[in-house]
Image (cartoon, grey):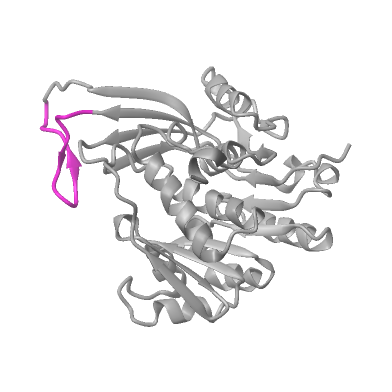
């Protein structure tokens, strides 16, 4: 049976274990603890993470009918993933389980200023074409594709399917996809929205993050909408040979995890609600600022009523 979703998020679903301590030392390059020391945890959290779960919850909070497609393994912590999706009214029955593997999980070390370092344990498998229930996606309006662990063949298949059924594509590639620019860039011609940070743009074009030609290279891709974020320095939206810049919203960062996922998903949500690119950028910056004000990637996600004040 075909499902009629506003957005289906495709990507990772992980279990995130947050550890925040006042004893962490952050000196701009390293997050560290003294060797052989015994330290106190000031705050901890176990919850779901990953690009697909984070974005699908963001869409749902903003009043859209959303679903999540991910591959998980065998873990007694999987309930954290299902519970987060269910309580946020995200359709989770497209999630596949490979009982021969483990669910990806991350330990996220959070410094007092909100900066963090992440230790990730990835399983041996990744989402494949066989895991997607293609016949149930034909009435979907948008696909939101985050990192698929370098599986560009699957991204190409999803984009081709979307083109056939007039489904719009938002793409937020990870470093594994960006490391293969010769195969990735040709796919952009059928992408409606591309979400990158400044470091990822530099990686894509093999340039310095501070190269004056960075924005020109992105404009040359001729994608309808591209956003480029730069953490606490703000973000750009590029469209129709134009660009808008917005500084980051004022907030007191507690944890930066999930800021990129909330930004991209919120920008797409604003497009679905027929907002202008400038207003969509404002929505995205506002929601990501709210997310980083809380521990975890979902607690601070705003509702439609909150963001539309």
Q: Nearer the viewer, residue 230 or 173?
A: 230
Image point 47% across, 61% down: which residue? 196
**Residue 165: which quarter of the image?**
bottom right
Vertical placement of residue 37 versus 150, above or below: above
Image point 60% across, 72% down: which residue? 223
Vertical placement of residue 80 versus 248, above or below: above
Q: Residue 146 location in percent, x, y?
A: 56, 51
- Which quadrant holds the N terminus? top right
- Extreme residue toward the right, this view: 1
Q: Nearer the viewer, residue 241 or 223?
A: 241
Horizontal relation, residue 207 to residue 271: left or right: left
The magenta-colored residue range is: 21-36
Q: What is the chief secondary structure element of the magenta stretch?
A: loop
Q: Residue 75 location in percent, x, y?
A: 54, 21
Q: Residue 271 location in percent, x, y?
A: 62, 58
Image point 40% across, 68% down: which residue? 245
Q: Residue 54 location in percent, x, y?
A: 52, 39
Is 13 contained in the magenta span?
Answer: no
Image point 46% across, 69% down: which residue? 204
**Residue 248: which quarter of the image?**
bottom left
Is 23 contained in the magenta span?
Answer: yes
Horizontal relation, residue 262 to residue 131: left or right: left
């Amino acid at each position: 049976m075909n499902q009629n979703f506003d957005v289906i998020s495709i990507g990772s679903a992980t279990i995130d274990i947050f550890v925040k301590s006042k004893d962490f030392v952050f000196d701009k390059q390293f997050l560290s603890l003294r060797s052989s020391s015994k330290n106190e945890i000031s705050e901890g959290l176990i919850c779901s993470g990953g690009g697909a779960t984070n974005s699908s919850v963001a869409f749902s909070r903003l009043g859209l009918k959303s679903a999540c497609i991910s591959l998980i393994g065998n873990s007694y912590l999987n309930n954290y993933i299902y519970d987060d999706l269910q309580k946020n009214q995200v359709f989770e029955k497209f999630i596949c389980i490979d009982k021969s593997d483990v669910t990806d999980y991350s330990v996220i070390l959070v410094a007092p200023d909100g900066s963090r370092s992440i230790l990730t344990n990835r399983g041996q498998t990744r989402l494949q074409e066989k895991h997607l229930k293609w016949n149930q996606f034909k009435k979907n309006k948008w696909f939101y594709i985050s990192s698929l662990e370098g599986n560009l063949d699957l991204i190409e298949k999803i984009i081709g399917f979307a083109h056939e059924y007039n489904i719009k594509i938002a793409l937020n590639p990870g470093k594994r996809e960006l490391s293969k620019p010769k195969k990735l860039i040709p796919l952009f011609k059928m992408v409606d929205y591309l979400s990158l940070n400044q470091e990822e743009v530099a990686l894509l074009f093999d340039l310095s993050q501070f190269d004056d030609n960075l924005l020109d290279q992105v404009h040359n891709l001729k994608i309808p909408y591209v956003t480029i974020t730069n953490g606490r320095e703000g973000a750009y939206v590029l469209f129709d040979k134009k660009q808008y810049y917005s500084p980051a919203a004022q907030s007191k960062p507690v944890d930066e995890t999930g800021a990129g996922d909330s930004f991209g998903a919120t920008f797409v949500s604003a497009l679905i609600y027929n907002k202008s690119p400038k207003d969509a950028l404002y929505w995205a910056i506002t929601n990501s600022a709210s997310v980083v004000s809380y521990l975890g990637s979902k607690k601070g996600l705003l509702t439609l009523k909150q963001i539309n004040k």
